[in-house]
Amino acid sequence: MAGTVGDDDVTAGGDSAPPAVTVSVVDAPQVNRRIPFSAMFNFRDVGGYPGHDGRTVRWGRLYRSDSLHRVDETDRAAFAALGVRTVIDLRRPSEVARDGRVPAYDGLAYRNIHPEHRSWAEQMYDPETSLAHFLVERYVELATTGAAGLGEAVGLIADADNAPAVVHCVAGKDRTGIVCALTLSVLGVSDADIAADYALSSESSARFSAWLAASRPEAEDPPAPFLSSPAEAIGLFLDALRDRHGSIEGYLRHAGMTDAQFAALRAHLLA
């Protein structure tokens, strides 16, 4: 079990609760939202949010998670019981080589898609500045340099034959948060609900931090950008893409998606 710390999407959330966000659905820790595992801390269902035309994002079709390389014998049966057909791994190839990938089993397809972006180690955070704005700058940069990868990832989610699918990175916070935000926006989910879903990653931090402290007591605490998911960050990020491309669909067309893929995404993910 690796447990080493990555260079950008290191861990999810902080010890404090996420900022208050107005949501139009039941509180996210409801049954079916968060799925407990022994060594994955940010695994949850993306279903249940209101979308286009009064329809609802379907449960059990799209999951998001921190790294699945920690699926062990304890969690393997529970993971297999979800019926996941496709794992979309957004980690860098170096992160996959360092930590490993989800264990293979019959019927599970694995895709490693790395949206190109600079290492966060090259961009130091100033604690006296806004953390949300720091994250937005990183996300916009990733969406610019990694557009092809993000478009490919959402395109895989759009294909009903790949469902149920799970998308993950290291902590399931940043790269995974971007892909899920783009997907939910195309489905017509409100920015408030997208922000609430993103901010849920903060709640996983205490569990991950406790596990990390127990398994690797010598590890240093990651810096603030790797620990927090302020709700406002994802909304500002989506606004930035709209300013540049007119809409989230416009950005994803720029990233390579087609109208047929948008229609397929809504057809199988909206109930």
Image: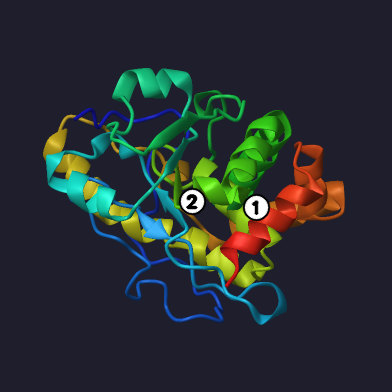
With 212 as the anchor, is 224 left or right in this view?
right
The residue to which callout 1 is attached is: 182
Amino acid at the residue labelled 1: Leu
Q: Residues within 10 Å of mark 1 (few under 14, many from 20)?
A: many
**Residue 76: quadrant of the picture:** top left
Amino acid at the residue labelled 2: Ala
**Residue shown at 13% from the left, 40% from the top:** 73
Q: Secondary structure at mark 1?
A: helix
Locate residue 149, reporting x and y percent: 63, 32
Quarter of the image with the N terminus is top left
Q: Residues within 10 Å of mark 2 (few under 14, many from 20)?
A: many
Q: Is residue 122 above or below residue 57?
A: above
Locate residue 192, reporting x and y percent: 61, 71
The residue to which callout 2 is attached is: 163
Locate residue 122, reporting x and y percent: 55, 23
Q: Front-most of 44 and 137?
A: 44
Q: Is residue 165 above or below residue 193?
A: above
With 100 as the anchor, is 18 left or right in this view?
right
Q: Earlier in the sequence, mark 1 or mark 2?
A: 2
Q: Is residue 60 above or below residue 10?
A: below
Q: Secondary structure at mark 2?
A: loop
